Image (cartoon, coloured by chain):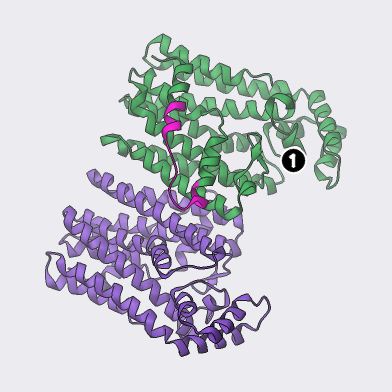
Chain colours: A green, B purple
């Protein structure tokens, strides 16, 4: 099978050939902009990788990889409106660069294009693709709503948080792998297993993101350091800290959560000190590792070549073991 | 074949059985609200009617009728955000009743559910459904963007306006009829013809809406009288008026268009007087009639029972001949 680098190039070359140059420009420019500001194309690569893992040429799943990539970008455009986010991947978000209406409508259009690509070269597989893609897309919407609900919810449990990220983020990673497996003609058992691999990896990726948001190096992440802390985002880190804090620590943490006016740097510094006192990073890393290991145990169950498993395992590790 | 009243009841009964009661409520309540405030379900009825016109039991196209209805409602939710509209069908719009984020996300979810319903009981027809549905959906987005562009565009020609309403409104009416035809197993020629019937009817319906907005009876339309006039909406009426006005009339019309502060009633009254002087209603009605007749000429070409053609013709007439 192709290496990860080869798959990355395969998708990049394909992507460059896709043009969204229809009329009117006000609709298509935001789409092209969003696609151009990149990202790792991780989900697209996972479609292709899964296809090859099951001994099928990845080119057969290129349009489905594109569908998953477009769907992911659609969710980012709309989520950024809902979260009022100014930056994405170090660039202006679509609603900031253009306007709210352009972001709503070009996001809608991108979702429809995702279905266009899902259909391309699908043959009889379109039924399986659609069943799985629709279920995933609905769960992603439900997950985004839960995430928004949590902002107003006083107490969020670890279980609720993990369920939310499973829906908002992880099922799409599972879906990417499953779509690739379906493209390759894998059986139900195997495509079910590889979905679980992706879902568990997706949870691990999100936990890694949460950890890096607080503990990563701003110069390397390209994000505002401690953005989640500044916004009181109820990540696993904050949830665990609130659970484990003694009365003094809890009082201090809650006073920071309540403050309307504060120096962001001071807040991040103070909350990180509390996180360090409570050993939060280790706890979150343990949770991340648990899901990574769960993914690997599903991967082991697959009856495919060991060398193929290794390609996915290595890719997952490069995505997870980021110190920045 | 069933009568229009029977088809209406068939769809209404089906719709009542569809429940969107999943979790979280914040996502599904806006969807249920939007569906509950009704509308004529014209597009859904056209799917069913087209299916029966081609001698097939309409029950076979119920889920596809639902798909078209959901898609239409999705566009209304998002259009209302973009147009900042407070009311829809005499009720609060979704973003007014809930909030902007709920309207964005529940609209997205509704679009995905439209694809879910399109897939149900589709068998091999899913390919044709998707090709046509996707093309239509993309054109609807492009049409909505054009409509927004026109707000900022100094001059809009009659041709541009007609092209915009064709994309934003009329192709979905054509799509509804075509999907019904595909469900019935109609051949390509017939399903192409019935698409044209719907497209031309769709243009006529929109022109009728424009005419009623300015000349209809507010008590019967349930809309703000002269809403389009108040908002300077570049409908066929305004475009024709600007073209036909002599220099005095044009000066008066443009002075109303430029005014930032005015009494809405006074503006509507003054613009309607100009419209009457210029015979705008007759011109718009002639354009509407042209498209209605074009629809009927496509309908005549269909090689189906005359009595079946009559059911569609009568339905179109009840929709078009509204004096309110």
The numbered mark 1 sits on a residue in which chain? A
Name of the residue lying farthest toward the top: A307
Q: Is residue A13 magenta?
A: yes
User: What is the secondary structure assignment of the residue under circle 1?
Assistant: loop
Q: How many marks?
A: 1
Identify the residue at horizontal 56%, vertical 87% (top origin). Answer: B270
Mark 1 residue crowding within 10 angstroms, few (<14) / some (14–19) / many (20+): some
For residue A56, what is the image quadrant? Answer: top left
User: Can you give x and y, in whole percent of width and height, for residue B295 in the image?
Assistant: 25, 70
Quadrant into which the N terminus of chain A falls = top left
User: Can you give x and y, in whole percent of width and height, for residue B279 in the image?
Assistant: 42, 87
User: Can you give x and y, in whole percent of width and height, for residue B206 in the image?
Assistant: 39, 71
Name of the residue lying farthest toward the front: B247
User: Can you give x and y, in whole percent of width and height, for residue B193 in the image?
Assistant: 21, 61
Q: Magenta segment range?
A: A12-28
Q: On the rendered structure, is B250 left or right of A181? A: right
The residue labelled by disc 1 is A232
Q: On the rendered structure, is B144 left or right of B251? A: left
Quadrant into which the C terminus of chain A falls = top right
Q: Is residue B68 magenta?
A: no
The image shows residue A185, relative to residue B190, as above or below, that is above
Identify the residue at horizontal 58%, vertical 78% (top origin). Answer: B254
Identify the residue at horizontal 85%, vertical 41% (top origin). Answer: A255
The image shows residue B161, relative to residue A23, as above or below, that is below
Q: Nearer the viewer, residue A220 or A132?
A: A220
Q: Evaluate whether residue A12 shows in this view.
A: yes
For residue A131, what is the image quadrant? Answer: top left
Q: On the rendered structure, is B313 left or right of A217? A: left
Q: Evaluate whether residue A134 shows in this view.
A: no
The image shows residue B167, relative to residue B42, as above or below, that is above
For residue A272, what is the image quadrant? Answer: top right
Q: Nearer the viewer, residue A232 or A239?
A: A232
């Amino acid at each position: 099978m192709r290496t990860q680098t080869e798959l990355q190039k395969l998708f990049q070359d394909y992507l460059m050939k896709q043009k969204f140059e229809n009329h009117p420009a006000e609709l298509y420019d935001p789409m092209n902009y969003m696609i151009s500001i990149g990202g790792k194309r991780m989900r697209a690569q996972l479609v292709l990788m899964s296809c090859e893992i099951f001994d099928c040429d990845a080119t057969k799943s290129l349009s489905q990889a594109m569908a998953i990539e477009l769907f992911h970008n659609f969710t980012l455009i709309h989520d950024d409106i809902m979260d009022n986010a100014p930056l994405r991947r170090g660039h202006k978000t679509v609603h900031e660069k253009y306007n709210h209406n352009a972001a709503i409508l070009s996001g809608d259009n991108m979702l429809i294009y995702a279905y266009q690509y899902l259909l391309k070269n699908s043959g009889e597989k379109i039924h399986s693709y659609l069943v799985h893609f629709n279920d995933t897309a609905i769960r992603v919407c439900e997950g985004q709503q839960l995430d928004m609900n949590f902002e107003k919810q006083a107490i969020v449990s670890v279980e609720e948080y993990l369920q939310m990220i499973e829906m908002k983020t992880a099922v799409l990673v599972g879906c990417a792998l499953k779509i690739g497996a379906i493209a390759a003609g894998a059986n139900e058992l195997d495509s079910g297993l590889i979905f679980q691999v992706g879902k568990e990896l997706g949870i691990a990726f999100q936990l890694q993101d949460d950890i890096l948001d607080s503990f990563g190096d701003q110069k390397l992440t390209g994000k505002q350091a401690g953005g989640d802390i500044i916004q009181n985002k109820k990540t696993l880190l904050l949830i665990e800290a609130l659970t484990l804090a003694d009365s003094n620590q809890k009082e201090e943490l809650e006073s920071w959560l309540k403050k309307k006016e504060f120096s962001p740097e001071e807040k991040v510094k103070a909350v990180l000190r509390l996180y360090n006192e409570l050993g939060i990073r280790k706890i979150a890393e343990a949770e991340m590792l648990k899901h990574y290991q769960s993914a690997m145990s599903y991967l082991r169950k697959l009856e495919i070549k060991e060398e193929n498993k290794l390609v996915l395992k290595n890719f997952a590790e490069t995505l997870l073991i980021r110190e920045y």
